[in-house]
Structure formats: C-alpha cells, structure tokens
Image: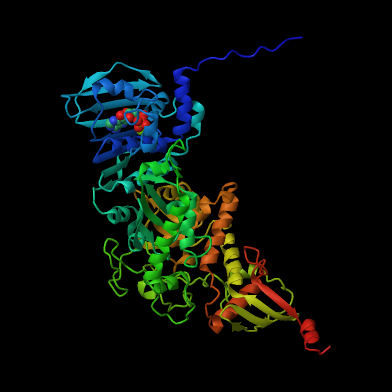
Amino acid sequence: MTTRQANPIRQLSTSLINKIAAGEVIERPASVVKELLENSVDAGATQIEVALEQGGTELIRVTDNGQGIPQDQLELAVTSHATSKISEADDLFQVGTFGFRGEALASIAEVSQMLLRSRTADQPSGFELRINGGHHEPMEPVGAPVGTTIEVRQLFYNTPVRRKFLRTPQTEKGHIGEAFTRVALAYPQVAMTLINNGKTLQQLPATPSWSERISAFFGPEIADGLIPVSSQNGEVTISGFVVDPSVTRSNNQMQYLFLNNRYIRDRSLQHALRESYRGLIMTGRFPICFLRLNMPFELVDVNVHPAKLEVRFQNSGQLYSQLLSVVRNKFLTTDLTARAQLSQPSVATAPAPAPQAVPRNPDAQHQIPFASQQPTTDWTAPPPASSQVRPHDFAATGPGDSRRRYEMPVDPWSPLPTTASTPPESKAKPPANAASPPPQRSTALQVHNTYLITESDEGMVVIDQHALHERIIYEQLREKVLAGKLECQRLLVPEPVTLPPADAAAVLEQSELLERMGIVVESFGGDTVLVSAYPAMLANHNPAEMLRGVVEKLKSPSTHVDRRDLVDELLHMISCKAAVKAGDQLTPEEITALLEHRELCQDAHHCPHGRPTALVFSRQELDRRFKRI
Ligand code: ADP
Ligand code: MG
C-alpha cells in the first residue's frame, strides 16, 4: 500500500505571480491599451498616440507627453505592486487616479517584449529599459522628448495558450477601438490619435467641448440627438447627455457612464436609465447616454473589480433616483411629443413629411426649434422614418423618391412573377394545385390596413399582410442565395456608416458571407464601414439602419453556432424589413399580387418566424354560427 505524499507548500516565484496577475488584468491587447492609456492620463499627458501593428497582436506603442518617469524609478515602475499612486491602506479609498494596484506594467512585461522609454523635464536625456518576458536588460540612456513611450510586442508570446485565444487582428482592433473610445470620451481635453498598420484611424484634437468629442466619434445621428442633463444632489453631480429616444440600440453598449472620469458599467444605473425611457422606446431597445457622475472618493469603492470596471456606491439607491428623475424631468419639460411621435411611427398613408430628429445644439441651454435647418448630407440619420412609414414604396411614386440616391428605383415586388407577365422559368415551379385550372382571381378586402379578407373553397380566409409578404420575400431570397444570384443594388455613391468599433469589426469579419447576401461592405478607416451595395429588395431602406440590423444578428449569441443559422437570421431580417407593414394601405393591384404569390409560395401558411400568415374560418363554421345549420 502506498501513502500519497502531499506536495510541500512553496512560495511562488515572482515571475509566476506576475503571470497569474497578468491573467487577471491583461485579457487581450485591448486590456494593454486600456492600462497604458490610463497611465498616460494619470501622468498628466495632453497628447497621446496609440500605434498598433496587426490590431495590437504584433505591436502596441503608446506615446505620451506626460511628466515621465525619473531614471531611478524606471526599474521600479515595472515591478509588481510598485506604484506612485498610493502608499497607505486609507489611500485605497481616496484614489483619484486610474492606477493604484501597481501591477499593470509588471504584468504586461511578464507576457510580452516590452520597451519602456521615458524622460522627465528635469533630466537632460531619457532612459530606456527593455524587458523580455519579465527579464530586465540593462538600462540605457537615449535621446527622447519629455514623456513616456511604452512598446509592447508579441503579447502572450511566452504563454502560448493565451496567444492562441487571440482573435483576428480585425477583432482585436475593434476591442482596442472601444478601449480607446472610453478614455477619449472621458478626456476631451487630451489630443488623441489611434493608428493601425500605419493608417490613422482616429485623430482627435483636444477640445473643451464634450459634445464635440462625442460627435467626432459617433457622427451626426448621435450629435443631433444629444439632450443635455445635469443634476446636483449634495456632493453628487450627474451631468452630460442622454440621446433622443428616436435613436436607440439593440444593446446597452452605447451607455457611457464615467465615474470621476473613469469609465464604469453599473447595472443599477443602466436600469434607472431604462426606466426613465419607459414608454418612449420599444421593448428590446436600449437608450444611449454619455453621463458623468462626480462624487467625493469616499462615497465609492472602486477596488472591487480587477479592471475597475465595476464599482460599489455607498448610496446606490439615492443615485438611482437621482438619475431617474433628472432624465424623466428633462423629458417632461421638453418637446416630448415630437419625440414620442418619432418612436411611434404614425400609420398615415399620405406621404406627409415625416418627423425628423430635432436638431439641437447640445451645448446651448435651449433647444433649437423644430423648424431649423434640415441636414441634407446626414447619412447616419435614418431617412424620414422610411422603414416604418412607407405606405407605397413599392410603387414607382413612393414618397422617398425625391431623396433616393440610388441608380434606379427598385420595386420589391418586381422579382416576383405576376399573372400578366409570368416569366418562362417560373413555370418550372408549378403551383401547389398544378392539375387544377389556374387559381381563380379573387381580390380581397383590406381591413385595418393590416389584414386581407378573402375566400377559398373552404371558407373565409383572413391574411396577415406583413406575415405573408415576409414569407414570400424570404423564400425568394433563400432560393437566390442558394443559387448564388441574389440581385444587389450598387450604390452610386457608397455610403459610409459609423459603428461602435466592435460592431464595425464584426461586420468586416463577416464581409464574405454578407456579400453572398448582396451586402457589400469594406473598411473605410476608423470605425466607418463603407456600404457599396446591398440587396435590391431593400433599395428604399437606409443603409445605416440595415447595417445595424445586420450587426444585431451577428452579435446575437445564438447565431454564432452555425453559419447556416446566421444566413437564415439575416434573410429573416432582410425579408422583414422589405415586407409591407401592418398599417400600410395597399392598392388593389398590390393586394392581387400578394394573393397570387401566396399560391406559388412554399410554406405560405407561416411567416419565417413561425407566426401564421392566415386564418381560415370554414364555411361550415360560419353557417353554424349564423344558425343556418
Ligand atoms: P499603477 O498605475 O497602478 O500605479 P502601473 O503598473 O500601471 O501601476 O504603473 C506603475 C507606475 O509607473 C505608476 O504608478 C507610475 O508612477 C509609473 N508610470 C506608468 N506609466 C507611466 C506614464 N505613461 N507616465 C509616467 N509614469 C508612468
Ligand atoms: Mg496603471
């Protein structure tokens, strides 16, 4: 019988401790960028440049003009638990800087090839320190301007498992873009540049105006919708902008909260925000905000999360109410009606001028009245509620014609054969009842601009116009995608669409697949994606809006499992957008066309989401109800 000997307890090596710490703080290149940027800001830099090679997987170089690190402290700066930011335990609760754990540089140096070059104002020259996988080389003097440059090459080169987990340079670049955005939004007064593979992605001049910095990132769609809010409750202030309820997102990524200039995420505050928009936006949509919370350091514990992303407020209940009431009150005292109409499109059938986002000067106290200038080149703003209020845009004279920027008007119905001019090849696919004479042309009565009532041999049929049209388009699209010949509409002028960095990366990563669906995208630098073609059926839709729909599908976790699921999801989305809506008044011709295609279409009884497209009230049932039998 053998007795198992317990392993002796040993002190871990510093190197191993640092590797473990690196695992906590440094997850991917974006974490390095976050830590380095925060250090630069802490050092009082007014100019910061981030240069990447291959989305940071090969190289990350952050250069700042901050105070620099004195020669005699250079070695110390990359030693774990060395920090200039706290010395006493009490300080832990009073930190006004980003740093204070003193482990970022040591961790990064442990898992990369690092170069640290720095010079303070009172030193005649700079000094340079190289560290390979935690191994320090001798320090050397070097000519350098005042400030600090840190280069991180080959992140995770000595922890191959981690290196393997890196995604494509494109994806990593997207994450870095988000990290860069968070710091750049917190510090508009710092000039910041982001470069990848020698290409400048962002060049942000220093500005005292927060809205200007926000606009530089998110374009006019957001800039025009900024609504200033501010509130003070004792020592706690909330200030910044919420965004017009007509502009929303499918997740809460665009809720930027900064606590004492530090980006944070907080479930309770996200909830307060959602509550304040209740009734103004649809369920499943999320408001956008840029808010700064400022409070004395002792009212918050920031030391509860390794990346300091989450914090603990001493009085979170009060903060919740403060946020809720400042936004609510703002909405109550401003032109809320205009906004409510925006988020609840009317079902008017006349091509009345659709409500536009209210342009407002976010830095001014008063909002510019409704009738002020109309942006004409505003490509991120949706066209006049095109997807929702488009009573007849399959007809040649749709209300959108005057703003149409495409080569030719495209009729979503046109690919469908009609009885009048059935193309020969569509005969190859016989209708379900091929043996019987052609289906008798019964028209239908449209009720509530939503349902079509018609008859069959069996009885009375009530059809959901949107569900049926959606199914018809879906079948058509699927056949074409499978055959590889989906018509796409080339845009005369490709349309740039600005997305959050991670979204842009996700879109570009799937560009091949999207192209099969007729959506042609390419990178336009920064977080802007250029749409040069998209499905002909969506010709009347705004490319920005369509692309956001695509992003939602790409990001939904359920569709990542299987490529076919993703294709299917995208087809659903396209057909849903292209189909007539409940509330659209149809012409007799349109009704007839819809009924005819119903005869030809597979699975016409259910829409692609599984809802029925029609209900049948049998003749017998009607007779029985009316006491005829
Ligand atoms: P922390 O930021 O938590 O203190 P770090 O490992 O990130 O820990 O940095 C260690 C120390 O190195 C900092 O406290 C600071 O004194 C110094 N340091 C790091 N980066 C810079 C920089 N860009 N400019 C000036 N000093 C820096
Ligand atoms: Mg730090």
Q: Does residue 516 appear to the left or right of 405 in the view shown?
A: right
Residue 101 in view in this figure: no
Between 366 and 32, which is closer to the camera in this rendering?
366
Residue 397 x, y percent position in the rendering: 43, 79
Q: Is residue 251 above or below residue 341?
A: above
Between 481 and 170, which is closer to the camera in this rendering?
170
> Which residue in the rendered view is the most extreme toward the front?
234
Residue found 33% across the figure and 37% down from its top: 97
Residue 330 x, y percent position in the rendering: 38, 65
Between 463 and 28, which is closer to the camera in this rendering?
28
Q: Residue 9's image quarter? A: top right
Residue found 56% across the figure and 80% down from its top: 449
Image quadrant holding the N terminus, namely: top right
Q: Residue 593's image quarter? A: bottom right
Q: Is residue 103 above or below residue 538?
A: above
Q: Does residue 120 appear to the left or right of 336 in the view shown?
A: left
State the colouring used for the structure image.
rainbow
Residue 165 in view in this figure: yes
Residue 589 x, y percent position in the rendering: 55, 82
